[in-house]
Amino acid sequence: MIKAGEIKEIFQDSLDKLLSSGMIDSRIDVNDDLVLLGEESSLDSISFVTFFMDIEEGISKKTNSELYLSIDKIIEFNSNGAGMTVKLLIDYIENELSGKNDNND
């Protein structure tokens, strides 16, 4: 199974692509508390959607398994109701992937 550090690398690669394409103006360093969606996010709606699609693709390639992220499901998964952080998204992805592994056993 993919580890949190590997997921963070995929996140950082995606954010770096956004910077090189000019979709964001300055480098964003990935850390657990980084807000990806919400009031404190540095991403506008288009860069967030691009980021989201890119990480789906990156994780799917890394795991050889399709991963489809749903903002609604992630928000439901978020028990504290705060914005979507890196930590929350990683926890959600790990939960989704572990469920797929359980179904394949």
Image (spheres, helix red, strand yellow):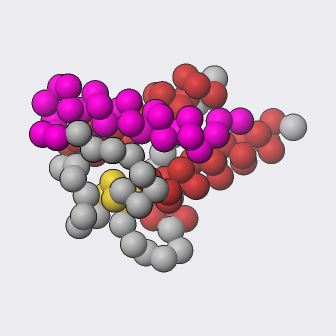
Residue drawn at 53 percent across, 32 percent down: 59
Above or below: residue 22 compared with residue 77: above
- Name the residue: 16% across, 35% down: 23
* Residue 52 quadrant: top left
Residue 61 appears in the figure: yes
Q: Residue at x 23, y 39 (%)?
A: 27
- Is 99 left or right of 60, judged from the image as shown? right
Drawn side of residue 29 relative to residue 5, left or right? left
Classify 11 as above or below 93. above
- Which one is nearer the viewer's eye here, 81 or 6? 6
Q: Residue 32 at what x, y percent from top left? A: 46, 56
Nearer to the camera, 60 or 34: 34
User: 69 or 5: which is nearer to us?
Assistant: 5
Q: Quadrant of the N terminus?
A: top right
Any magenta on residue 25? Answer: yes
Instruction: Please identify the dominant SS of the magenta region.
Output: helix
Furthest residue toward right: 105
Q: Which x, y percent locates residue 78? A: 50, 68
Q: Which residues are magenta?
A: 1-26
* Picture quarter with the C terminus: top right
In this rendering, is residue 42 above or below 102? Answer: below
Determine if the magenta segment contains residue 20: yes
Residue 15, given in percent of the width and then of the height, sits at: 31, 36
At horizontal 24% and vertical 32% (from top left) the residue drawn is: 18
Q: Quadrant of the rendered structure where residue 53 is?
A: top left
- Residue 6 placement (x, y as % from top left): 56, 35
Q: Quarter of the image holding residue 35?
A: bottom left
Say left or right for 38 vs 67: left
Report whether residue 71 is seen: no
Q: Tally the marks.
A: 0
